Image (tube, coloured by chain):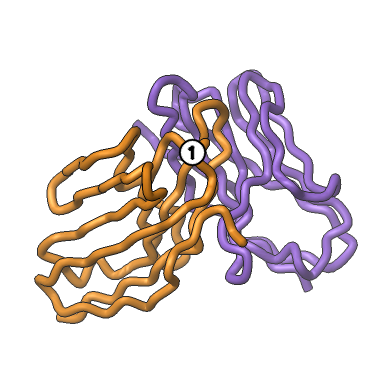
């Protein structure tokens, strides 16, 4: 079983809808949680970074962390066709830079 | 501020050859991490260098090696290439303090024939 699980999708939504993404993890040592967006043939782009349980909002993006359930989420409001990409969750422990990634969810926002 | 740069962007090699990939981190960042991305395994951590020292290592064979120079630029080498080494190799840099967030380069796409 992988340390970080993420539904591969694809997740298809109409323009303007809310996109809901999530990851579950098994290692309680993970402390820092990130969401990356990756367009085809590009490197991952950091979207959100959170530490500890709770919510963090940045523009149309909201990240949630529930450490008790080992569950993280990303919500994208007012989705646009340009949001069509693969979204990767990533996390690491308090020390070191080794990120452990989920497999990524492909999102399609249809005009 | 310029982002992470990787060269070359594309490479085609044959089995048994070796390859060297290069990464220049964001100015001021002293940590460089390398990842391999494949459709089957996703993104997997290879190793991290900080101040010219390898600080972390993933579960890859010894054919995969790296180094970091005093200007924080890093190189990754793969010897005796196998077909399964075909992947997107990504480099990420961070300042390794506080938030410890990592910023990725565009990657080098390696094809092994």
Q: Residue A15's image quarter?
A: bottom left
Q: Chain of mark 1?
A: A
Chain in orange on the image: A
In the image, residue A46 lies at what x, y percent?
Answer: 36, 46
Q: Residue at x 70, y 43 (%)?
A: B58
The N terminus of chain B appears in which quarter of the rendering? top left
Q: Residue B40's image quarter?
A: bottom right
In the image, residue A88 lies at what x, y percent?
Answer: 42, 57
In the image, residue A59 lies at what x, y percent?
Answer: 13, 47
Q: Residue at x 34, y 51 (%)?
A: A72
- Residue occupied by mark 1: A30
> What color is chain B drawn in?
purple
Camera-side residue of A36 and A50: A50
Camera-side residue of B93 and A101: A101
Of helix, strand and loop, which one carries label 1? Answer: strand
A97 shown above or below A71: above
In the image, residue B81 lies at what x, y percent?
Answer: 83, 60
Q: Residue at x 41, y 49 (%)?
A: A70
B29 shown above or below B59: above
Tally the marks.
1
Instruction: Give the left or right position of residue B103, taking residue B75 as reference.
Output: left
């Amino acid at each position: 079983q992988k340390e970080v699980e993420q539904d591969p999708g694809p997740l298809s939504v109409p323009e303007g809808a809310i996109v809901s993404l999530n990851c579950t993890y098994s290692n309680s040592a993970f402390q820092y949680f990130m969401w990356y967006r990756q367009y085809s043939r590009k490197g991952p782009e950091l979207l959100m970074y959170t530490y500890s349980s709770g919510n963090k909002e940045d523009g149309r993006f909201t990240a949630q962390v529930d450490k008790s359930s080992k569950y993280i989420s990303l919500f994208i409001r007012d989705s646009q066709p340009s949001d069509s990409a693969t979204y990767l969750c990533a996390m690491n422990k308090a020390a070191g830079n080794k990120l452990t990634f989920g497999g990524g969810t492909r999102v399609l926002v249809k005009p | 501020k310029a982002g992470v740069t990787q060269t070359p962007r594309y490479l085609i090699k044959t089995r048994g050859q070796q390859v060297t990939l290069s990464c220049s981190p964001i100015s001021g960042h002293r940590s460089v991490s390398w990842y391999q991305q494949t459709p089957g395994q996703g993104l997997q951590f290879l190793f991290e260098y900080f101040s010219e020292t390898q600080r972390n290592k993933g579960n890859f064979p010894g054919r995969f090696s790296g180094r970091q120079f005093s200007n924080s630029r890093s190189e990754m080498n793969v010897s005796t290439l196998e077909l399964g080494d075909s992947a997107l190799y990504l480099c990420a840099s961070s300042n390794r303090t506080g938030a410890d967030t990592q910023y990725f380069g565009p990657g080098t796409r390696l094809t092994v024939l």
